[in-house]
Amino acid sequence: MQNVAILGATGSIGKSTLGVLELYPDKFRLYAVTAHSRVKELAEIAKRFNVSLAVTSDPSKLEALKEALAAIGCNARAEAGAEAVARLAASPEVDIVVGAIVGAAGIVSTFRAAEAGKKLLLANKESVVCGGKLLMDTVKRCGATLMPVDSEHNAIFQCLVGETERSREKARIILTASGGPFRTRKDLSDVTIEEATHHPNWSMGRKITVDSATLMNKGLEVIEARWLFDFLPERIDVVVHPQSIIHSMVEYEDGVVIAQMGAPDMKNTIAYSLAYPDRFTAGVTPLKFSQIKTLTFEDPDLNRFPQLGYAYEALKMGGSASIVLNAANEIGVEAFLEGRIGFTDIAVLCRSMMYGFQPPAPTTLEEILETDRQARELARAWADGYSEHRR
Ligand code: NDP
Ligand code: MG
């Protein structure tokens, strides 16, 4: 029996994880769950899974969480604050940490889980983008096991299983992208919030759904792949594959391409990550080949979706460019969702931040967090000025 903690249990990935865990009560015990603001939902999850600990990362929500737990007769202990989430990630009670927080808010807990040598099922791609080599070195040094939950990286992980170091060195990663809701739309200047928060193939949280619409999500995934698998950016390609059946591929030097296919359901990648090196069968969505009419592929359009190109540029620039790009994007998406800037302004903000703010490469977690903080502050000022100007 292994104890699991889900960080971000109320989110899309969090809920998919709950859906897998409840099918395997003899293998996993859900020990603790966290959320930020949805404390009522958190309390319901705590009660349903009889967890020992429920944590809200928002300190102002502690009383509300306690009340919500008491109202439904759940005796889970309640804690609050980002430090409580970080403590949980390293807790000796926990064997498996599921990192399903959205955004750079997940960085600290990812590092803590890695430092504590946990099995870490990581969906929070922003922590890989910002943590980069420092995170991967920590994983190695502390004997942690990092299972990528992001479907493309989970696919690449599967395509690389059993390959020698030498064959990996010559291989090429081909990340697939759905292309998002605006793949064929010419003019993106008048995209509405409603349009940008609906994805054709996947049902996900709002931030990643907007990232999928700008292709920033694929850019973040290029950076994520660079660090997770130690591939140079020139050996990472992106191909648009609107059906989202092939989750990604690896091309070897003899021309063989190994592709991982499956239904677009995050429960499948979560189940794979929990079971590895074994396999689970219950609760996974099978692929129905007779229902697939065609599989198509095209190149991404970097003119309409410049943020994908910025990710490659950030890797080339080095330093802290990926952290700055990530922070600018998070603030840009937030401002867009608040109706303060337009859809294409997110890219404008990312670009001006990447070229306008170039701090040196971080050498510690604290430096990563400080760069993220400064970048957010600058990006927020940019977005405020911009929305003022628009009025
Ligand atoms: P959601 O927005 O659905 O959920 C986010 C979770 O994080 C919620 O539990 C939320 O709590 C919590 N949270 C929000 N803000 C904070 C904060 N400041 N501190 C701590 N916790 C916080 O996101 P998703 O589940 O869609 O995505 C989670 C991560 O997984 C992202 O990094 C995303 O890129 C990645 N991912 C997601 C996929 C998907 O299919 N959804 C696919 C691949 C990767 P509350 O509910 O209380 O706000
Ligand atoms: Mg993905």
Image: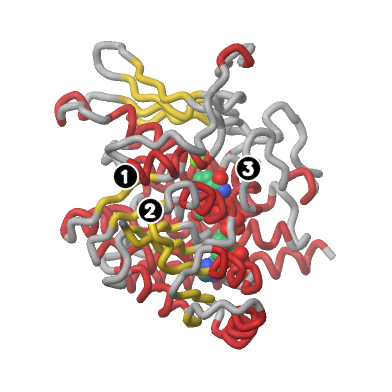
The residue singled out by tag 2 in the image is 128
**Residue 152 visible in the shown view:** yes
Secondary structure under tag 2 reads helix
The three-letter amino acid code for the residue at tag 2 is Val
Give the CA separation, mark 2 to mark 1.
8 Å
| Rendered location of residue 195, percent (x, y) | 77, 43
Of residues 253 and 311, the one drawn nearer to the viewer in this rendering: 253
Check the image and report above or below for 238 versus 315.
above
Give the CA separation, mark 3 to mark 2.
20 Å
**Residue 379 visible in the shown view:** no
Of residues 174 and 21, the one drawn nearer to the viewer in this rendering: 21
Of residues 285 and 25, the one drawn nearer to the viewer in this rendering: 25
Secondary structure under tag 3 reads helix
Give the CA separation, mark 1 to mark 3.
23 Å
Check the image and report above or below for 57 versus 344.
below
The local crowd at label 2, few if under 14, some if 14 to 19, many if 20 or more residues have their Cα within 10 Å, is: many
Quarter of the view holding residue 181: top right
Check the image and report above or below for 373 versus 337.
below
Secondary structure under tag 1 reads helix
Question: Which of labels 3 and 2 is toward the front?
Answer: 2
Residue at (41% x, 79% y) in the render:
83
Of residues 73 and 42, the one drawn nearer to the viewer in this rendering: 73
Q: Are marks 2 and 1 in contact (CB under 8 Å)?
A: yes
Res. 228 mark:
1
| Rendered location of residue 216, percent (x, y) | 55, 44
